[in-house]
Amino acid sequence: MNAPTIAPPDTALARCVGAGRTYGTGDRAVVAVYDATCSVGASDRVAIVGPSGSGKSTLLHLLAGLETPSAGTVTWPALGGHPRDGAHRVGLVFQAPSLIPSMTVLENVELPMLLGDTGPTEARQRARSALDLLDLDGLRGDLPQELSGGQAQRVVIARVLAARPRLILADEPTSQLDRHTADHVADVLVQVSDEIDAALVVATHDRAIGGRMTTVWPIHDGRLRPAATPSSMPQPTEGDPA
Ligand code: ADP
Ligand code: MG
């Protein structure tokens, strides 16, 4: 008798199958993403690269479960459910630092854990060690307004680190930073993803970030092109604004 066939577990952290997103209806409908099929596996390092308006943020929001697809499906097989239904499984880093102005750096880093199922003692411990790891321990008591742009983004990354998600999604995380600071923040993002063995997907038009990932998903006019490696992407020509 044949042994029963057991399907291997689906290890994708996030998967889009024919996923599309249209904003508005009728004459005013804008298709931001068409028919995207892609998946993010454990420890993947992906850059979604395309010009402004090409659909990068929309695709990232679909992967985060922040937007509902208007066509196709988005699932999170290895996360065991929708990211919004469970704490800490997906960590988000946005373009503009998203710290709560009235809370200190330490409180900002603790907050998502306290809103989840982490007790206050453990939340404090994890927040402190995340801030230590990113050399931010001296800023624990500061308010966000006292931080530089690069420091604020590193605090956001510390907040992600402390919550230990399995998938980190970052939308243009360095676009408001100068070149030197952007490079540092990009390094920290990769370092943190390595540290907690999380997959990392970054939407960016910053080639320096793209070069730090192992896979590039080019997107144009809402259409994902075949995945590429960073070295196979066209090189910038002179005068190209990065
Ligand atoms: P990118 O991040 O690459 O700049 P977006 O995903 O933000 O691109 O946008 C893709 C397209 O969808 C653009 O044409 C944009 O104007 C449109 N779009 C994005 N969000 C909305 C929205 N909430 N309502 C209407 N149109 C939107
Ligand atoms: Mg965007």
Image: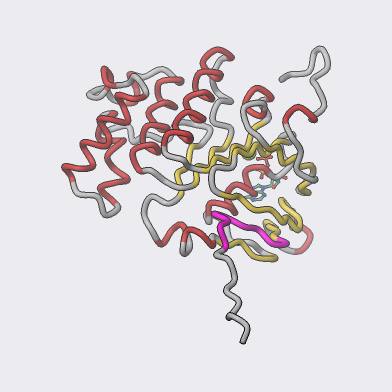
Residue displayed at 42% across by 32% down: 157
Give the image quadrant in which the ligand numbered 1 is located.
top right
Q: Nearer the viewer, residue 110 or 80?
A: 80
For the stretch drawn in magenta, the main secondary structure is strand
Residue displayed at 65% across by 34% down: 214
Residue 6: x, y in percent? 57, 74
Asked whether, in this view, residue 41 is left or right of residue 35, the answer is: left
Q: Quadrant of the C terminus?
A: top right
Residue 113 belongs to magenta span: no
Extreme residue in the front direction: 1
Q: Is residue 220 above or below residue 83?
A: above
Q: Is residue 116 above or below residue 49?
A: below
Residue displayed at 72% across by 30% down: 230
Q: Which residues are magenta?
A: 10-18
Residue displayed at 54% across by 42% down: 43
Asked whether, in this view, residue 62 is left or right of residue 224, the answer is: left
Q: Quadrant of the N terminus?
A: bottom right
Residue 162: x, y in percent? 33, 38
Residue 102: x, y in percent? 27, 33
Extreme residue in the bottom direction: 1
Q: Is residue 21 above or below residue 132?
A: below
Total marks placed: 0
